[in-house]
Image (cartoon, helix red, strand yellow):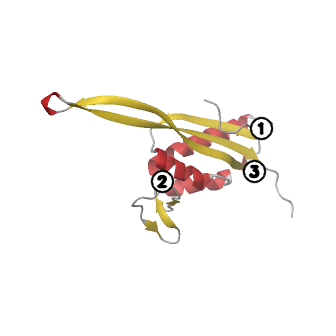
Amino acid sequence: MPYSIKVEGEKYAKAFGRNLPLSLKDSVNLCRALKGMKLDDAKEFLEDVIAKRRAVPYFRYLDSISHRRGMGPGRYPVKEAKHILKVLENAEANAENKDLDTDNLYILHIAAHKGQVIKRYTPRAYGRSTEIRRDRVHIEVILEEREEKEE
């Protein structure tokens, strides 16, 4: 599966998490919150979400989502934050392998896409059965090394 955007050059590092057992709706909102952040700030934000100190602002799939103080609708998607943190750490390791400066890495692109759907059946009473669907999510990350701004 290719990436959503094409980047060429030595200043980029990529990582891909395939078929992760996550909620697509929570992953989309979390990726939207992370896009454009500095890598260190994004990792700190995800650790705060895991500890439930900061909520993720939701912009889509807002049905019956409570407001959080000072930000509007939001939640604490802990499971999604743990998996996306691993993908970000993988992208950081790829950047180190390419000899990029990890202090100046920014999230150029991060996206969640629908993955494979695993279908199973569970038996019910009177000879019936019910389908169990396990949805999966793909997470893609592209990091960009930016030059330091001199003042």
Task: Give, as a three-letter code, the residue at label 1.
Answer: Asp
Nearest to the observer: residue 93 or residue 123: 123
Q: Which of marks 3 and 1 is nearer the N terminus?
A: 1
Whether residue 44 is visible here, answered yes or no, is: no
**Residues at discs 2 and 3 in contact (Cβ within 8 Å):** no
Q: Quadrant of residue 96?
A: top right
Q: Quadrant of the C terminus?
A: bottom right
- Asked whether, in this view, residue 129 is left or right of residue 72, the answer is left
Query: What numbered label is drawn on residue 99?
Result: 1
Seen at 65% across and 39% down, the residue is 91
Q: Mark 2 = which residue?
A: 50
- Asked whether, in this view, residue 125 is left or right of residue 148, the answer is left
Residue 18: horizontal and vertical position, in percent? 54, 33
Nearest to the observer: residue 88 or residue 61: 61
Q: Mark 3 = which residue?
A: 104
Seen at 83% across and 58% down, the residue is 149
Tell me: residue 68, above or below residue 104. Answer: below
Q: Which of marks 2 and 1 is nearer the N terminus?
A: 2
